[in-house]
Image: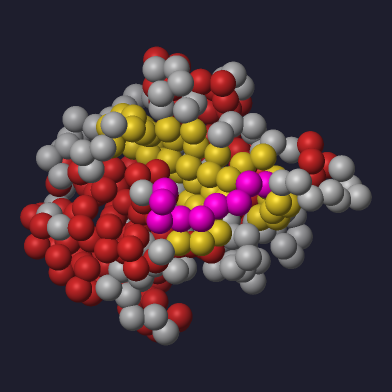
Amino acid sequence: RHPIIFDTDPGVDDAQAIAIALRHPELELLGLTTTYGNVDVATATHNALLLAELAGRGDVPVAQGAAAPLVKRRCPPPAHIHGANGLGDISLPPVKGRADGRSAAQFIVDTVNARPGEVTLVAVGPLGNLAAALQLDPTLIERVKQVVIMGGSIREGGNVTPVAEANMFNDPHAASRVLTAGWPLTLVGLDVTHRCVLTAEHMARIEAGQGELGRVLAGSYAFYRDFYRTFLGIDGCCPHDSCALAWLLRPELFTTARGHLAVVTEGDAEGQTLFAPEGRDFIDSRWSRTPAVDACLGVDGEAVSDWIADVLA
Ligand code: BDR
Ligand code: CA
């Protein structure tokens, strides 16, 4: 089993991934840490608590984190994509539990240090919590097993601007620190998440398999799907955040390249991820000095989408 901390801004596609994190027998979910992004951070925490409770996993700690980016001004939450409540504006039952007293960053530091070399951090929102954890304890990079990030784009272009993916765009300064920190890291970006489509048939199976949690996943999916249909002309939706877990558990469905990453923090290209494949020489030697990471470039999108539905059905 993989012990993981899942850092998230739920968010419709986050909710699908949280359900996998809560349910999959090969994952040991040590905690959910929350950030602003798709919603404000209090709503993200509420949704994380709710989803855990609906899955009968109220025992999973939820620690609240970043309310805003490190440097730039916070982007308004995209209510037209995820709904004002982050879950497609469907009605939601009350939450019973409360968040852990620690900040997300402190929770990450404590949990990783308690199990050195074992814990995988899976982050699927803006990266302020991981950046803050690194600031609290820079030696964390030696004790984390690996970091898997849904975000960025190598060749695909962006989804907020022509070059920037949302999680990178929302906090490019945090992303820059996290992507160049020197820990074992895999980027699961739009190059692969845009190849995966969760269809209405997939969601019907998930709804049938997940009880009350299924109602929330299916109701929020319907709202999210309207956005994909209207703005992108796709019938179905990209399960971005679940792809990070698919990479962790089914890496054979992906192809990756090793290289050096940078995140543009200012200007028109803010939030763009730049990737220099390992072994290529550039006149500017900075590119060989930053630590190498893995980036997903290809995927069997149908197999990943089916895997998501199979896990949750
Ligand atoms: C990412 O942005 C968010 O809106 C989604 O939840 C996902 O994490 C996709 O660009
Ligand atoms: Ca997300």
Q: Which residue is drawn at 27% across and 58% down?
A: 307
Q: Report whether residue 49 is seen.
A: no
The extreme right residue here reads 283
Depth check: 305 or 101 in front? 305
Report x, y in % for residue 193.
45, 62
Report x, y in % for residue 39.
41, 54
Span shown in magenta: 251-259
Instruction: Identify the coloring.
Output: secondary structure
Depth check: 311 or 240 in front? 311
Give the side of residue 20 with respect to residue 132, left or right: left
Give the side of residue 271 with respect to residue 225, left or right: right
Counting the numbered discs, the total is: 0
Q: Residue at x 63, y 65 (%)?
A: 155
Judge whether residue 187 is colored magenta.
no
Give the side of residue 235 with respect to residue 294, left or right: left
Report x, y in % for residue 248.
40, 44
Q: As displayed, is residue 212 above or below residue 23?
A: below
Q: Residue at x 43, y 40 (%)?
A: 122
Give the side of residue 214 with respect to residue 11, left or right: left
Q: Which residue is drawn at 39% across and 17% down?
A: 115
Image quadrant where residue 86 sits:
bottom left
Magenta stretch: dominant SS?
strand
Image quadrant containing the N terminus: top left
Judge whether residue 258 is colored magenta.
yes
Q: As displayed, is residue 22 above or below residue 74?
A: above
Image quadrant where residue 70 sits:
top right
Q: Report whether residue 63 is seen.
A: yes
Report x, y in % for residue 294.
58, 45
Image quadrant containing the C terminus: bottom left
